[in-house]
C-alpha cells in the first residue's frame, strides 16, 4: 500500500534524469549514490524491490555518445550498484542491461542502465496474469537501507 500511495515524480519534471540530481534532496529524488559523472537512483517503477538505474549526469541517448571517461565512470557506478545490492538485499543474481532506442524498450531518451536484483523463484503468477508486481517494501524504506550501507561499500 505504501508503494501505491507514494508520490510520483513532481509534475514539473520534464526531464527527470537531468532534473532529479538538481533537486538538492537525494532522499526525495531516491538517489542512492553519486560519482563524478553518473549516479544511482531507485527505479520508481521497479521490476523487483531494489531495482536501480545507473544514469550519466550528461543527457545523452546512446552509449556511443558518452566519452571514454563517462563510460568508465558509468561502469564503475554499475559495479558499485551491484556491490550495494549484494550487501543490502543479498539477491541470488542481478540483471544488468540497457534499452537503447524505443524499439528496444527505451521509454526515456536519457541513457540509463538497469540493475535488477533477482532471487531464485522470484517470478510468480502475478506479473503474468495480473500484469502486477508484488513489492514487499516501499521505495523510501529501501532507500534508507541503501543509504545506510553506502559508506561501507568500497569503490
Image (cartoon, rainbow, N blue to C red):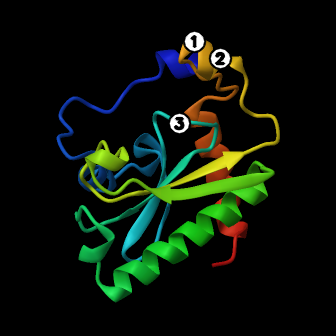
Q: Position of residue 145 (x, y in %)?
A: 68, 46
Residue under the point 53% across and 77% down:
76
Q: Quadrant of the N terminus?
A: top right
Residue under the point 64% across and 35% down:
141
Residue under the point 21% across and 39% down:
13
As drawn, is 27 to the left or to the right of 142?
A: left
Q: Which residue in the protein does label 3 denote?
A: 46
Q: Position of residue 66 (x, y in %)?
A: 29, 77
Q: Which residue in the protein does label 2 denote?
A: 126
As drawn, is 49 to the left or to the right of 35?
A: right
Q: Which residue in the protein does label 1 denote?
A: 130
Question: Is 71 located above or below residue 77 in the figure?
Answer: below
Tell me how far mark 2 sits from mark 1, CA to CA: 5 Å
Tell me how far mark 3 sits from mark 1, CA to CA: 16 Å
Q: Nearer the viewer, residue 9 or 73?
A: 73
Task: Tell me the number on the disc at residue 91.
Answer: none
Element carrying mark 1: helix
Question: Is 140 located above or below residue 104 in the figure?
Answer: above
Q: Position of residue 70 (x, y in %)?
A: 35, 80
Do callouts 2 and 1 mark residues in contact (Cβ within 8 Å)?
yes
Q: Nearer the viewer, mark 3 or mark 1?
A: 1
Q: Which numbered disc flags the more N-terminal residue, 3 or 2?
A: 3
Q: Nearer the viewer, mark 3 or mark 2?
A: 2
Amino acid at each position: 500500500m505504501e508503494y501505491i500511495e507514494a508520490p510520483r515524480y513532481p509534475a514539473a519534471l520534464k526531464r527527470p534524469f537531468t532534473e532529479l540530481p538538481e533537486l538538492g534532496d537525494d532522499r526525495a529524488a531516491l538517489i542512492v549514490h553519486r560519482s563524478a559523472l553518473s549516479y544511482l537512483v531507485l527505479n520508481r517503477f521497479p521490476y523487483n524491490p531494489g531495482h536501480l538505474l545507473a544514469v550519466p549526469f550528461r543527457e545523452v541517448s546512446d552509449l556511443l555518445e558518452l566519452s571514454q571517461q563517462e563510460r568508465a565512470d558509468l561502469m564503475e557506478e554499475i559495479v558499485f550498484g551491484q556491490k550495494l545490492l549484494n550487501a543490502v538485499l543479498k539477491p541470488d543474481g542481478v540483471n544488468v542491461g540497457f534499452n537503447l532506442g524505443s524499439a528496444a524498450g527505451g521509454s526515456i531518451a536519457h541513457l540509463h542502465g538497469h540493475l535488477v536484483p533477482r532471487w531464485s523463484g522470484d517470478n510468480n503468477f502475478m506479473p503474468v496474469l495480473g500484469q502486477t508486481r508484488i513489492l514487499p517494501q516501499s521505495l523510501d524504506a529501501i532507500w534508507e537501507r541503501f543509504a545506510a550501507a553506502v559508506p561501507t561499500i568500497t569503490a
